Amino acid sequence: MSHDFDQLTQYAKSFTGLTEEYESLLKEVGPQIIPHLAGVTKNFYEQLSAIPETEPYLSGRIDSLRAMHTQWLEGLFTKDFDTNYTSGMYKVGDVHVKVHLPVEFMSGGMTLINGQLIPLIINSFSDDTDKCTKVLSAINAATGFSLLTMQQSYQEASIAEELEKFLKISGMSRALFSNLAEAYKD
Ligand code: HEM
């Protein structure tokens, strides 16, 4: 399936309020925040490990997951949120779809991550309320953007699954379905 990642980027920005000003601010505060992100990841996996349902997905791979996760977190403070970032997050979402990670792990996981980042930011910028507020808003926008683009994979996987079921139940061939879909596409 081909994807319009440019369109998805604009769509995700409109929903999360991720502006150029926020992207620049995240890069500006990156050097101050990045040294603390391994700790954020460590706490995140401790919280996940306390949820019994996560066990099958974490067992035997915590160290590699921690490393991938810290790298992703650092990217929030170094990368441009452009088409490349969106297609990368779509692929990360797809990796989770392929390991059958339940969809609510995505929003639940991101909520836990924000819960770790909020006190870190408040401690780091406690002497400047205005900056602290802006950094928190920028992080909220960036993690929301990442979540929305990752979850797009789940939506498409669910549509593909429904189609598989329909073809199986109806006995219709994929070729016939594709021809009909093409003929009725508008
Ligand atoms: C919600 C925020 C999350 C982010 C940003 C995130 C990020 C990532 C990234 C960057 C990868 C590597 C993808 C690749 O191979 O290219 C990955 C893989 C994976 N993640 Fe997540 N993840 C999140 C939540 C979770 C949660 C909550 C779990 C499980 C409880 C989880 C389990 C996994 C597993 C099992 C893999 C595949 C690892 C492998 O290939 O061995 N992730 N994740």
Image (cartoon, helix red, strand yellow):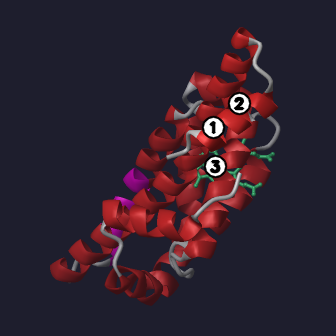
In the rendered image, which residue does mark 2 sit on? 177
**Residue type at the position of mark 3:** Gly
Say which element carries label 1: helix
Which element is circle 2 on? helix
- The structure residue drawn at horizontal position 68% and vertical position 39%, both measured from the top left corner, is 97
Q: Nearer the viewer, mark 1 or mark 3?
A: 1
From the viewer's perspective, is residue 44 above or below residue 19?
Answer: above
Which numbered tag is attached to residue 181?
1
Task: Give above or below for 31 relative to 159.
Answer: below
In the image, taking residue 145 as reference, residue 51 lies left or right, namely right
Quadrant hosting residue 141: bottom left
Mark 1 and mark 3: span between their CA atoms? Answer: 27 Å
Q: Residue 156 sits in which quadrant?
A: top right
Label at residue 30 = none
| Residues shaded magenta | 114-124
Q: Estimate the spatial distance between the alpha carbons at disc 2 and disc 1, rounded to whole Å.
A: 6 Å
Q: Residues within 10 Å of mark 2 (few under 14, many from 20)?
A: some
Query: How far apart in space, not on screen, are marks 3 and 2 (Cα)?
Result: 27 Å
**126 relative position to 157: left or right:** left
The amino acid pointed to by label 2 is: Phe
For this view, does 71 lie left or right of residue 151?
A: right
Kindly indicate whether the residue at mark 3 contacts the one at mark 1 (C-beta within 8 angstroms): no
N-terminal-most mark, 3 or 2: 3
